[in-house]
Image (cartoon, rainbow, N blue to C red):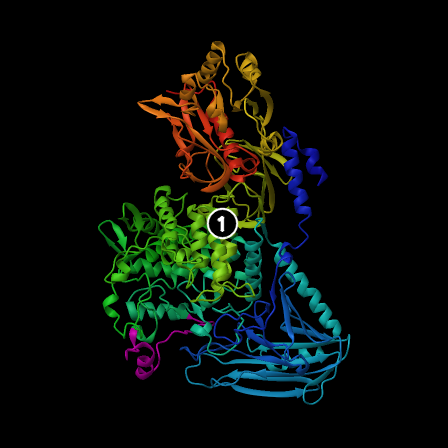
Amino acid sequence: MNHIFRTITIQGACLLMAILLCFLQEGNAQEIYAGGYKAVFTSPPGKVPTAKTPDGPLAGNGDIGLTLGGKPDKLLFYLGKNDFWRAYPVYPGGGIALPGWLEMRIPALSGADYYAEQIQDKAEIAARFKKDSLSVWVKTWVSATANTVVIELGSDKACSMNFALKAAEGNTSVNAKGVDAGTYWVTRSFENTPLLAWPSHVAMAVKVLGAKPDEHGAIALKPNSKVTMVVTMYTNFDSKTWKQKAISVAKATTPATVNQLRKDHYTWWERFWKQSTVQIGDPFLEKYYYASQYLFGATSRGNKFAPGIWGPFITKDSAAWGGDYHLNYNYQAPYWAAYSSNHIDETDNFDKPLLDYMESGKRHAKDLLGIGGIYYPVGIGPMGLVTTRWPLTPDEMEKRYASRENTIDGGYKFLGQKINAVFSVGNMLMRFYSTYDAAYARKVYPYMRECANFWEDYLKFENGRYVIHMDHYNEVMPNLKNKGQWRQLLGDFNSTLSVGLVKMLFKGIIDVSRFLKVDAERVQKWEHIVTHMSQFTVVEVDGHPSLKGVESSPSPAQNRVEGLARVSIHGLLLPAGVCGPKTDSAFNQVLLGDVSRWKDKMKAPGEWANTLGNGIETCFPAAVRVGYDADEIMRQLTDRIKRQSLPNLWITAEGGGIETLAAVPLTINEMMMQSYEGVVRIFPNWNKTKDASFDQLRAYGAFLVSSRLERGEIKYVKLLSEAGRPCLIENPWPGHAVQLLRNGQKAERLTGSTFSFPTGRGERLEMAKIFTHKPHLLIITGGHGFKKVPFYNMMDSLGNFSYDKIEQPKANELIASPAVNKYDALVFYDMNDSITASQKQAYLQLLQKGKAMIFLHHALVSYQNWDTFQQIIGGKYYAKATLVDGDTLKSSYQHDVVIPVKIENRAHPVTTGLSDFEIFDEVYGNFGIQPTIRPLLSTTHPGSSKYIAWTNPFGRSEVLFIQLGHGPEAFGNPNYRQLLRQGIEWSIKNNSPTLNRK
């Protein structure tokens, strides 16, 4: 690295230090930050086995999933596998299936204390069970690199343990078991059953190391010795000789094999954790951030079958919804955080089930709608499997759906929706924009083109716009609740879900086709669709504009105006990405208003955005994207997690499983960095008073981005260009020039609000703020006591300012002299009443020249007998009873109160990034206010006047007054510090001697 610093000639030591800190942080990145968090269990699982999300300790390798169930005296190691399905087209009965489990009985532990840890950085489960003087420990992990589960155990006293390897039975499966030279094996198969799309076979074998079991599976645990049980697991999709493979691998396993597997396992997970890191200073949310990343890493592998709704953590047959790939959001959502988290390898399995179903999708489009392209039902499985046929007999249909019509839509569940195929294009585009991988683009482009073929045929061009008939915002189907009466609900027109996803499709396919240089002759039509697509429907409700889910619908429920919600978010923001503050700021204000009213619908904590059923991974990131207050989002997310999550740190939803694993990572990633529309934004929605950092988040354009925010200042921005694409990035330091370094060498000097510059493949780039001038302040005190140490500690914390201190009356003498010109701003924290005529004139002359002046707290009480002063500052504290417009006014004060502060103007640079807050401070009441003020803050405290911060134009200056700031509690308040820092920065930037004001 030394050569980097020898070549740097950037002005100012501050820039050099910023870059040095950047590299030092990189050098310290070896520690796995996620290792600071784990899940702890102090009682046996209560939801194992289950048809949904288990609550026990979990481990997995993206193919095999291990769920620890049972009690200390009967431990059950449930083993699921993403590629073991009963390939039957109807659930229950069809869908992902349970291979089996290993049962471990230790009678001496009956009634023992239960303690287990889910250790996420190492991807293992460690447990200890104690009863009286007996203590048994267990450690288990699923090899990250092999089809092997390792279970190690030991005891401090002699005791007996019996084990049994069991395959699940029933549901037409064929089972077998046996012993081969001390290796126990079981198999389970689905084959030769009518309507099975393909056969499934699984074999599990177990070998014991460190002890010799008897013929009944009994093992004597000896004090302070270790027994290792190695379970191998193969399906017919792993090996044509699946049974022999499981047995032979188990038989060949030795202690040396286990040690190598362990080494490879730790190496794999170390690489996984180093792919990205986020630190936000919130231990609770960080815990769930890394737990969700762990669970997804344990759930999905790129070279294996894609996970269904419950991932590989299957503990019984007939999992809810068949554990299939539900295409109207459940299948897509678990992957959403992986793209920005730089876990691209774990997304590589996403596309294959969709590509495998294309021929069936073409038949559905042709046979059912008479058009081209692909048309998918709501649920599919691997290898071209459909999982969502209606029940196969009218009697079964009536029993489950209150209708005998089991031939709806040819017997397939489309549920009134045409978007099941195009929905997945959102994930494909996320990966494409994140990598610009040509091979990937070529793989998925045929799918995207068939979606385009479908929608070109299905769209109608009416009255100068493209419209969508009969594609429904929500699923429409017969069920027991509506007593089989459902056709009257058909007829949605221009669902926001459909309009947004279709616009996403055509915007995206234009980009991909140009990247691949194909279908140039079709781009004009696609562009016409994008520019003439129907607008989203907005109506006025109670005096404010709000989003409507459909333009019209025969369904009374659907015709209600609910504002931005989970389903419409899918079409607008996630995955569609066709809306946001940078796309259409005016429309974004409508969405932001809808989000601000989510609170009004709550009845209890955790209900914000209505995500208990579905949508936590949708609504929270969307709130970040539209610009809702980050602190409030984090508070609501914390409440939601506390309301509904499991001991294994899996956040649950009533209507799904692994979808929720994207919720916390995507929400936080969006706060740290955004890149939709191809523009990289650093800390775009984050409270800048809170320190945070991120390393190697992946941005559109195929950039890995790192940055750190400390004490309100972005210290650096680093990028690695994977694809050599042009970089478009918002200036992280608005108003400042930026130095760009390329591979450590000084390069361009960047200016403006947004930068665009070319990059080379593999090029490393760093950006650092150029400090051209450090503003110099004059801090004026006197006439009122204050705690000097905490006050000046606060001033020191504000960062990019230097200052001189002076007390009254000498301050006014300096102000009336030429020496005042060396100061960029005057900060008044005085309470002075002595001023000469020449000094008054000096104030007026400075203001006429545009000098920046900031008045704080008791400065309002100054110059009781100088009437012009209240015109300057914008108000007056009446120290004595004074007759004003026929009323006698006398101001008041009250120390040590909690003041609720409301932001009156969130768009003003002084208050940007702030949300409403509370502060322990002093209030002033009944003071005068000039009609010229422009309010920034207000309060409802009964002892205070309404407005407590404002700007006030005078001469060619705009004076800033902040009434807050009495004592140490206020000086230490991060909101007050941010307010003051931004206020000084704005005053200096806004006021200057050359500023021309009316």
Query: Counting other residues with Cα less than 10 Å from the Cα at mark 1, is it few (<14), some (14-19), or many (20 or more)?
Result: many
Q: Inspect this view and state whether residue 919 appears.
A: yes
Q: Position of residue 243 (x, y in %)?
A: 60, 82
Judged left or right of residue 470, residue 172 is: right
Indicate whether residue 384 is drawn in magenta: yes
632 or 659, nearer to the observer: 632
Say above or below: 677 vs 207: above
The residue segment tinted magenta is: 380-408
Q: Amino acid at mark 1?
A: Glu
Q: List the single residue furthest toward the bottom.
A: 215
| Residue indicated by mark 1 | 670
Q: Quadrant of residue 330?
A: bottom left
Q: Inspect this view and state whether residue 441 appears.
A: no
Query: Measuring 48% from the left and 21% from the top, which residue is drawn there?
Result: 862
Query: Measuring 50% from the left and 25% from the top, which residue is drawn there?
Result: 988
Element on which disc 1 rests: helix
Q: How many marks?
A: 1
Say above or below: 510 vs 872: below
Q: Position of residue 678 (x, y in %)?
A: 46, 46
Q: Quadrant of residue 160?
A: bottom right
Q: Position of residue 211 (x, y in %)?
A: 75, 81
Query: Measuring 26% from the left and 70% from the top, which residue is drawn there?
Result: 486
189 or 757, nearer to the observer: 189
Judged left or right of residue 515, residue 223 is: right
624 or 184, nearer to the observer: 624
